[in-house]
């Protein structure tokens, strides 16, 4: 795979704004102040005008798309007024994404999702520890075999659980 697109990190961070903490889904964008802090952390402080309602609904749509539970048409509000504009440099023309300032981040995340869909299909996935975890991953491994949001977190928990279940099964069957 080629180098990660710059907005992949933004897309993944946005998908992962609903982690499960202590058995409950915690929406990091639900509270406006927390949402603004999230934006500054992940995109810098030039996005103060970002429409939080649209950002949340775009997040929900992108999560549903990854789960195969939505159609791309649901992304339309995030793409309203979005286009590419030519920037002429010393060597030629470069096309830059041009977005209304109120939904730059929603548009960039939607475009990043679509770029991945075309260039790396199936690489954006929910974590396999679905009983406990609501996070997503973008798999950049050669073998396309990543299964967990993180090896240190869900990877180890799932391995420990399998080990425990295997031992339990050996004991009851033997
Ligand atoms: Zn996980």
Image (cartoon, grey):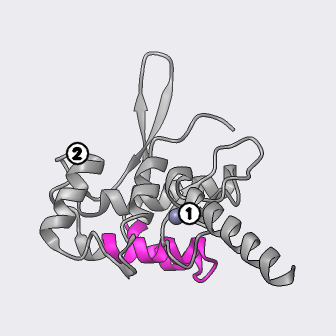
Q: How many numbered discs sit on the rendered protein?
A: 2
Locate residue 69, reporting x and y percent: 60, 83
Which residue in the structure is indicated by mark 1? 157
Task: Residue at 87%, 79% (x, y): give it.
Answer: 174
Circle nearer the N terminus (1, 2):
2
Give the label on residue 44, or none. 2
Residue 161 in percent (x, y) is at 63, 69
Q: Nearer the viewer, residue 15 or 166?
A: 166
Name the spot of residue 12 as percent of width and height, x first.
46, 56
Q: Residue at x 50, y 79 (%)?
A: 74
Task: Identify the residue at horizontal 55%, vertical 39% (top origin).
Answer: 4
Range of residues picked out in magenta: 55-80
**Marks 1/2: CA–CA distance:** 33 Å
Which of 60 and 131 lies nearest the eye of the viewer? 131
Q: Which mark is residue 90?
A: none
Q: Where does residue 23 sit, x and y in percent of width and height?
A: 40, 80
Mark 1 touches mark 2? (CB < 8 Å): no
Tell me the SS state at disc 2: loop
């Amino acid at each position: 795979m080629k180098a990660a697109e710059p907005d992949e990190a933004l897309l993944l961070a946005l998908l992962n704004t609903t982690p499960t903490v202590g058995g409950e889904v915690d929406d990091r964008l639900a509270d406006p102040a927390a949402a603004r802090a999230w934006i500054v952390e992940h995109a810098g402080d030039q996005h103060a005008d970002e429409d939080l309602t649209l950002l949340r609904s775009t997040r929900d749509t992108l999560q549903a798309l990854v789960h195969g539970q939505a159609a791309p048409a649901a992304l339309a509000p995030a793409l309203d007024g979005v286009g590419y504009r030519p920037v002429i440099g010393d060597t030629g023309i470069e096309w830059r994404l041009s977005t209304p300032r109120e939904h730059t981040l929603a548009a960039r995340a939607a475009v990043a999702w679509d770029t991945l869909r075309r260039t790396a299909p199936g690489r954006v996935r929910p974590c396999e520890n679905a009983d406990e975890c609501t996070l997503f991953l973008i798999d950049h491994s050669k073998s396309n075999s990543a299964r967990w949001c993180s090896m240190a977190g869900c990877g180890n928990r799932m391995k420990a659980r399998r080990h425990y279940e295997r031992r339990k099964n050996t004991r009851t069957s033997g």
